[in-house]
Amino acid sequence: DYQALSPETLGARLGGVEALASRIGPDASAWSVREVGDGNLNLVFIVEGPKGAAIVKQALPYVRLVGESWPLPLTRAFFEYHALTRQAARDPGRVPEIFHYDEAQALIVMEYLSPHIILRQQMMAGRRVAGLGRTLGEFCARTAFRGSDLSMQAPDKKADVALFSGNVELCDITENLVFTDPYFDAEMNRHTAPQLDGVVAELRRDEQLKIAAQHFKRAFTSRAETMCHGDLHTGSIMVTDDQARIIDPEFAFYGPMGFDAGMLIGNYLMACLAMPAHVADDAACTAYQDWLLDVVGETWATFAGEFSRLWHTERTGILYARTLYEDQGDHLASEAALREVLGEIFRDAMGFAGIEMHRRILGLAHIAEFDSIEDPDVRAPLEEKALRLGRTLVLSRAGFAGIDQVIATTRIAARG
Ligand code: SR1
Ligand code: MG
């Protein structure tokens, strides 16, 4: 008997949940409850009381952004719960602790991260996060590696792929909104300035770009390499000035190892290109853009370093068995195989990054960095830079010598 919560009903409905009462205080009438959800899908409550605070996240039976006309299954809370447990095991301490899960009510009670704020807000305010690239690079590498056939045993991996293959509707959102809609005149698309019409028409005429978008859609639907977060943008990361935690994996699915890192890098790059609208002083803006590009470099370098470390120390799964190489003393072959895998992940990540940049400007779900720029004559040129850079990332993914060349290309676009 699912019922959506409200601040008024939450205390009465959840007062008897021991995991909550023991953290907030036993008297639910003394709890204060605020609904703070600002995402596209769910209800999110902060519950505070004499003993402490917790988050209650509850799925709604529809897409919050659009309304009841777009039904969405409550099972996304089930996938978020299972994704959080796997992420906690694969990269301990990086996701919120779960206190309680109620499948019928599609709700998760979890750790209240405080004084954390959403990374996107931190970036729009021009504030840095020490160690951001290292934390996110480690998270992406550890979850990619430890959820894959490089680490997992066959029965566990296959059972998990089967479990997450049930996240049909959330994957369907990504399949359509990310990989398809931006590249034609889809009903739910919205770009926010007629100044963009020219470049949009150009992209939609671009046969190579559309072929590449379908290439990546096929990778998304068919390459069940690892459990991906599935929606790793800067709104899915909470930060202080020196900490980062990852939230909201309800889009989790088994997919390509470069998917999360690519989505994340796409969001860093958009933040970088939008920054002139958010930091008025030119020198401060340039310095902050340089920091964002350092984060891009650090995220990828950490990813590659951590993935390599795990390759050397934890390769216990179905793939590239150690006996193929080390037992024969053939270290060079193992290193060559690692280079091949990392090269493929890098090219995929750049493709996913470019596609994410397109969909956040042309599709339904936008980002605040651009949408909060009121003047279309300021907004559109910045969005156009992101659209063109996105195209370059998708189509030149195999031509980049490495992340430094991506950073240099972005710097030229940002300063141009
Ligand atoms: C209808 S849902 C739109 C977007 O919101 C989520 O955060 C995902 O990014 C999804 O693509
Ligand atoms: Mg989300």
Image (cartoon, rainbow, N blue to C red):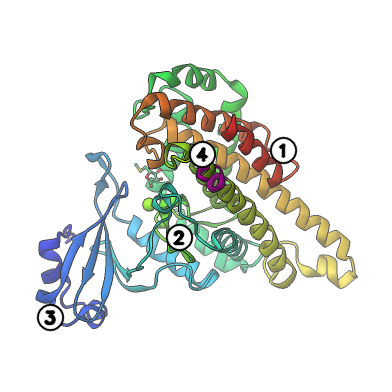
Question: Is 260 covered by the magenta stretch?
Answer: no
Mark 2 sits on what residue? 163
Picture coordinates of residue 191, whole percent (x, y): 39, 27
**Which amino acid, mark 1?**
Ala
Instruction: Give the CA distance from mark 4 to mark 2.
Output: 50 Å
Question: Is 288 covered by the magenta stretch?
Answer: yes
Instruction: Give the CA distance from mark 1 to mark 2.
Output: 33 Å
- Quadrant where the image shows the N terminus: bottom left
Label 4 packing within 10 angstroms: few (<14), some (14-19), many (20+)? few
Tell me if residue 244 comes above or below residue 391 in the rendering.
below
Instruction: Give the CA distance from mark 2 to mark 3.
Output: 38 Å
Q: Nearer the viewer, mark 2 or mark 3?
A: 3
SS at badge 2: helix
Instruction: Give the CA distance from mark 1 to mark 4.
Output: 34 Å
Picture coordinates of residue 356, whole percent (x, y): 50, 39
Mark 3 sits on what residue? 27
**Which amino acid, mark 4?**
Asp
Determine whether label 1 and label 4 are within 8 Å by CB: no
Picture coordinates of residue 296, whole percent (x, y): 60, 50
Mark 4 sits on what residue? 282
Mark 1 sits on what residue? 398
Label 2 packing within 10 angstroms: few (<14), some (14-19), many (20+)? some
Identify the residue at horizontal 22%, vertical 69% (top origin).
Answer: 47
Q: What kind of secondary structure does the magenta stretch mostly adopt?
A: helix
